[in-house]
Amino acid sequence: MIRVLITGAAGLLGEYIRKAFQYLPYCSAPELILTEHPKHPQVLENPEQFLPMDITDFSQVSAMLEATHPDVILHLAAYTDVSGAERNEAECRFINIDGTATIATAVNEMASGLCFVVYISTDYVFDGRRGDYREEDVTKPVNVYAQSKLDGENKIREILDEGRFLIIRTSFKPYPYKHDKAPTDLFTSAGYVTEIAPDIAFAVLNYEFVTQRSYSGIINIASKERSAYELASISNKDRDKPVVETTLEAIRVESGVSLPPRITLNSTRWLHIKQSLQGELASKARGTKSKTT
C-alpha cells in the first residue's frame, strides 16, 4: 500500500482529495499521513487525525518524514490569499517559497530512503494575455501570489532530481461559488473542487506513470474554458441568491491586485495520460479477474 503524506491536509483541496482516494476506480486507497500547521484549528480539535507540522521548520519536517516514511508527499500547504499577498508579501513568500524548499531539502536528506514530491501550483504563473497555456509555455506572473508559486516550482526543480517530482498546475473553486460577484470578462479553466480533486488524486496514486509522460515533470489539470461568471452561475441553484455580474476591472479595483484576464490551461496532455492510464489499469483488472475465475 502506498503511503501518502499530505501537507495542508485540512484545507479545501486536501479534504476533497482525501475523499477521492477512497473511491478511484482500479486504485487501492493509500495509507494517509495528514499534516497541518500546528496552530490550525483542525490540529487542535482533531489531534488524532491531523499531525502538527510547520513546513517552514526544517527540524519538524525532517522528523516527520523520518517517523512516517512516506512514499509520496502531496504538498498542498500554501499561502493562497491572492489579494492578501499584495499586503503580506514577506509572509506569502516565506510559506510558498521557503516552505517548499524546506520540504524538498528534507526529502533529499531522508536517511530512510527517497520519496516522491507532488507540488500543487497554479494557473496564475501565466500573464493571461492569450490563454490556452500548455505546460511548455513561457511563464510570466503578474502578482505576488503567482510569483511565489512559480518560485516554489523553481525550488522543487532546483533541489530535487528529475523524475522525483511532479508539478501540477491547476485551479479550483469551492462549491457553491463563495463570492457574490463574478466577472464576465475574466476567462478561466478552473473547475469546482469536486471535479478537480479526483483527477489530482488519480495522478498522485499513479505518479510514476504520469511523470514519465509529463512535460519535464509538469502537468496541467483543469476544466474547460469559460468566464468566471459562467462558472459561478453553475452553483446558483445551491446558493441563497444568484451570483451578480461584474467586470475584471471592478474586481482589480476592489481587491487591489492585478489579475490575468484569460488564465486558461490546456489540459490535453493530462486527458491523454488519464485515458491511457485508465485503459491500462482496466486491462490489468480484467486480466487479474480472468486468472481467478
Image (cartoon, rainbow, N blue to C red):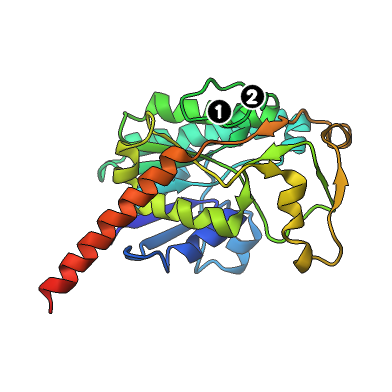
Relative to 94, residue 4 above or below = below
Instruction: Classify residue 133 as left or right of residue 271.
Output: right
Look at discs 2 and 1 and give the one toward the viewer.
2
Outermost bottom residue: 293
Of 145 and 37, the residue lying toward us: 145
Instruction: Classify residue 55 as left or right of residue 12.
Output: left
* Residue 6 position within the rendered picture, expressed as x and y whole percent measured from the top left: 46, 53
Q: Characterize the local packing of mark 1: few (<14), some (14-19) or many (20 or more) Cα atoms within 10 angstroms.
A: many
* Proximity of marks 2 and 1: CB atoms separated by less than 8 Å: yes
Q: Assign the N terminus to one quadrant of the image.
A: bottom left
| Residue type marked 1 | Leu
Sequence order check, earlier mark of 2 and 1: 2
User: Which residue bears the numbered disc 1?
Assistant: 150
Residue drawn at x 14%, y 72% is 290
Q: Residue 59 is drawn in which quadrant?
A: top left
Instruction: Classify residue 161 as left or right of residue 91.
Output: left
Instruction: Classify residue 165 as left or right of residue 255.
Output: left
Residue drawn at x 71%, y 51% is 231
Callout 2: SS: loop
Q: Residue 285 is drawn in which quadrant?
A: bottom left
| Residue type marked 2 | Pro
* Residue 205 position within the rendered picture, expressed as x and y whole percent measured from the top left: 35, 54
User: Which residue bears the numbered disc 2?
Assistant: 141
Relative to 47, residue 201 above or below = above
* Residue 168 position within the rendered picture, expressed as x and y whole percent measured from the top left: 48, 40
Relative to 1, residue 63 above or below = above
- Tell me if I can see residue 4 in this picture: yes
* Residue 169 position within the rendered picture, expressed as x and y whole percent measured from the top left: 52, 38
